[in-house]
Amino acid sequence: MSKNFAAMSQSIISAIGGAGNVAAVTHCMTRLRFVLNDASLVDGEKLKAITGVMGVVRNEQQCQVIVGNNVSHAYAEVLKLLPEGLSGASGVPVKSKLTLRRIGAGILDALIGTMSPLIPAIIGGSMVKLLAMILDMTGVFEKGASTLVILNTIGDGAFFFLPVMVAASAAVKFKTNMSLAIAIAGVLLHPAFIDLMAKAAQGQKVEFIGISITAVKYTYTVIPALCMTWLLSYIEKWVDRITPVVTKNFLKPMLIMLIAAPIAIVIIGPLGIWIGTGISAVVYTVHSYLGWLSVAIMGAAWPLLVMTGMHRVFTPTIIQTIAETGKEGMVMPSEIGANLSLGGSSLAVAWRTKNPELRQTALAAAASAIIAGISEPALYGVALRLKRPLIACLISGFICGGVAGLGGLASHSMASPGLFTSVQFFDPSNPMSIVWVFGVMILAIVISFFTTLLLGFEDIPVETPQPKEDQATDAAISTPFAAAQSAVKTH
C-alpha cells in the first residue's frame, strides 16, 4: 500500500474523470465510493494501475475504489481535491429507464450508504457487551454489580437507539433535514409511545385520530427508520413548495412533523418491521432447514458477495438478530472460513512468488485478513488478481463454513472475524466453542494454503529496469528515426 495518499488520491481523481465528474463521495472500511456524473469518463485500466489501488468495482453511476485499511487517509486527501459539500450521497438525479435492476441497485445503495457509517458504533457496542459478558462469566465482578450494568448499558446504547442513528445517517444519504429525521425517529423510542405499544401488544385499543395503531417495538430496528427518512425527503420538498415564504421558519417544520410522524407510526413503521422480519425469516428459515450446509454455502459465497457489495444486505439482519437474541449463527460463522482462507491463500502466494512487490502485498494482505479479519486487501490484491487462489479460497470457505456450522458457532458481535475478534464466538455456556473457533481458523489457513499451492497460479513477472546505457542507445536510435518520420509527413 502506498503511503503517499495525496499523490494516490490525485491519480484516482484524474482516472475517474476529474473533480468535476464527482457528484458525491463516501467511504466504508476499505473502499472509496464515488457517485459520478458521467460513468463513461472513468479510465478503468488507468485506475487499476495506480499504486495503492487494490481493485475497482463499477455499478451504474458508482465507482468503488478499493484501497484497503487506510481508506480514511485516502478519503481525507480526496476531499481536499473536491469542492466542499460533496461528501455523502448525491443529490444529482440520474435520468434513466426505471427497471427492476435499477430499483434493486438503488435499494442496495441506500442500505449500504446508510449502514456503513454506523458499523463502528455497532461493532464497538457489541464488543463492550461481550466484555461485560466475559467479566461476568469469569467472576471478576459479582452478579448484578453496577459496573457490569454500566458496561452493558454502554454496549447496548448503539442498539437501543439504532433507529435514531439510522435516521441521522439516512438523512445524509437522502439529503433531507437531519434534525427532523432524528426527531421523528425519537418519537418511536419515546417512553410514552413505548408504553402505548406495550398496551397495544396486550390487546388494548390504541388509536390516532380514529386510526388503529399496530403494536410494534422499534428499539433495535433498522428498516422502519430507513424507510421513514426516505419518505421524509419527499415530504420536506413538498411542504417547502406549499408553505408561504413568511411562514417557512415555523410552519414548514410543524407541517413536516405533523405529516411525517403519523405516517411513520401508522404505515411506515409497521411496514418496515414486516419487511425486516420477512428478510430475517427467509435467511434463518434456510438456516433451520439446511443447518451446517447453509453456513458452508455462505462461506464459499462470501468472497463473491463482497466483490459485488451484496454482503451488506445482511447487515440489518445481523444487527437485529444479535440485538434480540444475543448472537447470530449463520452469516458471521461463515465469515471465519472466508476471511482466514483469503489470509492462508495470500501466505501461499507470498511463499511461492518470485515477485518481491507481490510478496510484500500478499504478506500485508494475509496479516490483515488473519489478524484483523479485513479480507478485501487479500481478495482484491491477491486472490482476484491471480484467479486460482480465489478458487482455493472458495473451496476452503465451503469446508470451513461447514465445520463452523457443525460446531454450532455463533457470534455475539458483528466485527469482521479474525484472530483479534475471535472472542466474539466464545459461548460461556459452551466452553468447547473456544476449541471450535480456533480449530476452524487453523483449518482455513492450512486448507487454503495447500490448495493454493496445489492449484498454482501464474506469477506476475518482475519488471527489470533498463540499464542507462541501453536507454541512451535507444534514445540515439529513436532520434534520427523520429526525424525521418517527421520529414516523410511534411512531404
Image: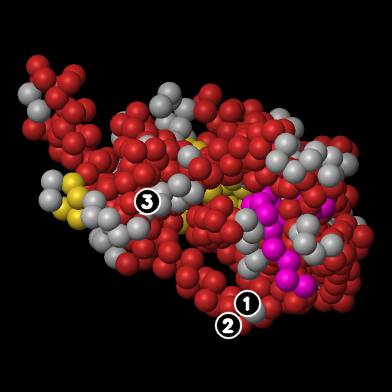
**2 and 1 marks in contact (CB < 8 Å):** yes
Tally the numbered discs: 3
Name the residue carrying label 3: 198
Residue positioned 36% across, 63% down in the render: 274
In the picture of the structure, the residue carrying the numbered disc 2 is 289
Q: Is 85 part of what is drawn in magenta?
A: no
Q: Earlier in the sequence, mark 2 or mark 3?
A: 3
The image quadrant where one finds the N terminus is: top right
Q: Residues within 10 Å of mark 3 (few under 14, many from 20)?
A: some
Q: CA distance from mark 3 to mark 1?
A: 36 Å
Of residues 171 and 460, which is closer to you in this image? 171
Residue plotted at (79% across, 40% down): 142
Work out whether residue 242 or residue 156 is closer to the camera in this orientation and state it: 156
Q: Which residues are magenta?
A: 407-422
Under tag 3, what secondary structure?
A: helix
Residue toward you, 213 or 490: 213
